[in-house]
Image (cartoon, rainbow, N blue to C red):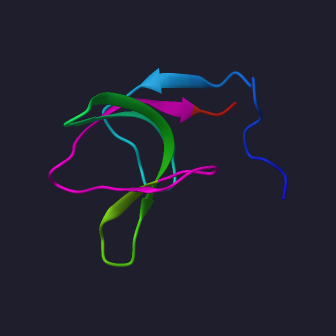
Amino acid sequence: MEKKFHDGQIVFVRLSDDCSDGSYGIFTITDKDGIKVFFKQKKMQADGSYVLHSLNEKNIRIFLTLKIKLLSVLQLW
């Protein structure tokens, strides 16, 4: 399967406070270990919850106990 994004590829993002289902965004997650930054796809599950979907690592299920903030959304041209 062809990669969606390639190593070293430059992506353009726009600042946003909304990321629709299926869109890619840059998210911060704050937990007991500090702040982590991720580039993930936001996907709605059948039960209405969301997962930050990764193309190359583990998905991150969004729990109310996690402090998650959207920084920007991928802008495709």
Q: Where residue 14 sits in the image (x, y, percent)? A: 48, 23
Residue 52 drawn in magenta = no
Residue 33 percent location from the top left of the image: 25, 33
Outermost residue to the left: 65
**Quarter of the C terminus within the rendering:** top right
Asked if residue 68 lies left or right of residue 24, the reply is left
Dividing the picture into quadrants, the one containing residue 15 is: top left
Residue that appears at 84% across and 59% down: 1
Instruction: Tell which of 5 and 30 is nearer to you.
Output: 30
Residue at position x 55%, y 33% in the image: 74
Q: Which residues are magenta?
A: 53-74
Left or right side of 65 for 6: right
| Image height of 45 relative to 37, above or below | below
Give above or below for 23 relative to 51: above
Farthest residue in the bottom direction?
Answer: 46
Q: Position of residue 59 (x, y in %)?
A: 47, 56
